[in-house]
Image: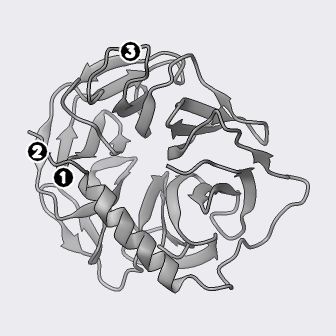
Amino acid sequence: MFSTQSKLLSVSLLALLLLSSCSETNASSVVTGGDSAQASVQAGGKMGGVHDLVLTEEGLLMGTHNGVWIQVGTETPARVGDSRFDAMALSGYSGGLIASGHPDSSEEQVGSLGLRKSSDGGATWASVSLYGVADFHRLRASGASIIGLASGSLVRSDDSGVTWLELPNPNIFDFAMNPTSSNEIVASTEAGLISSSDGGQSFSTISDAPFLALLSWGSNRLAGVSPTGAVYNSMDNGKTWQEAGNVPGGPRAFSSLGDEMTILAEGAIYYSKDAGENFTERIAGVPGH
């Protein structure tokens, strides 16, 4: 199913997008708004570089080099559970959380963890499938359907990750699934945004869409961040977009839930409670990866 390429396709595309952000970001691309009563906290060296963000009702989950961490409100982040696996991808799904990556020193040393799941908020994890085979760097879910991107392959499961079907991959960098309709997918590529209405079997170009790097689909709002840190919202499944606020360029991870958004950019995690119109720095000093 998966090739033996030494690097994921997403890595090379990320490099291109970050180069774009470096060349295009200007002094006006700064954090807007701000609430001095919500001062940011320091990440701390033990947290490790952040790969993925997942906003939940309980707090902000972070997949890091050193396990899964959570920030509740504006408190200092803390590790969830004892596992310190390298959580390259992290996502919510109908049964709790799913993740992928590489084992820590206490686990069997295999190259890839495949898909693992947690039903207790990340305190404990169990292997689901593809152990030793796949290292997902992108995981998104809608109900029991999961789509993952690993080693240049785009794959889909409709039974919570037990069995997989390989899909055509039109050079996707990031993607989001409609939380109420798993067949609807919007993805970012080097050529612009594309969409699928058949579960990823085919894609078509979204005309007149902004050039976005990262995507998140929470409830009825599809949101995206450009390589320069500009935030956009779509309320019609990606057909039209409205620009909101911005964060410093070079976004590395993004998650939304209702009107809330979090973005990792330039070594800090920024938070918005008004659909991206205004951001405050929530966590500073996030290590690179």
* Label of residue 152 in the image: 1
Q: Amino acid at mark 3?
A: Glu
Can residue 241 be seen here? The reply is no
Residue for point 18% across, 44% down: 155
Coordinates of residue 81 in the picture (x, y in percent): 57, 18
Report which quarter residue 86 is drawn in. Answer: top left
Residue 96 placement (x, y as % from top left): 45, 27
Q: Give the vertical position of 160 relative to 220 (above or below).
A: above
**Residue 204 relative to residue 52: left or right:** left
Rendering quarter of residue 164: top left
Counting from the top left corner in percent of width and height, residue 36 is at 90, 59
Asked if labels 3 and 1 touch by Cβ distance under 8 angstroms, the answer is no
Looking at the rendered structure, the secondary structure element under dot 1 is loop
Specify whether 49 is left or right of 272. left
Residue depth check, mark 1 versus mark 3: number of the one nearer the observer? 3
Q: Quadrant of residue 270?
A: bottom right
Q: Position of residue 195 (x, y in %)?
A: 26, 66
Of labels 2 and 1, earlier in sequence is 2
**Kind of residue sitting beneath label 2:** Ser
10 Å neighbourhood of mark 1: few (<14), some, or many (≥20)?
Answer: many
Disc marking residue 3: 2
Query: Which label number is shown at residue 232?
Result: none
Query: In the displayed structure, would residue 167 be above or below residue 112?
Result: below
Query: Mark 2–mark 1 contact, CB under 8 Å?
Result: yes
| Residue 143 shows in this picture | yes
Give the crowd class for mark 3: few <14, some 14-19, many >=20 residues within 10 Å. Answer: few
**230 lies left or right of 89:** right
Name which of mark 2 and mark 3 comes first in the sequence.
2
Mark pair 1, 3: CA separation? 26 Å
Residue lying at the far right of the rendered structure: 37
Report which residue position mark 3 lands on. Answer: 107
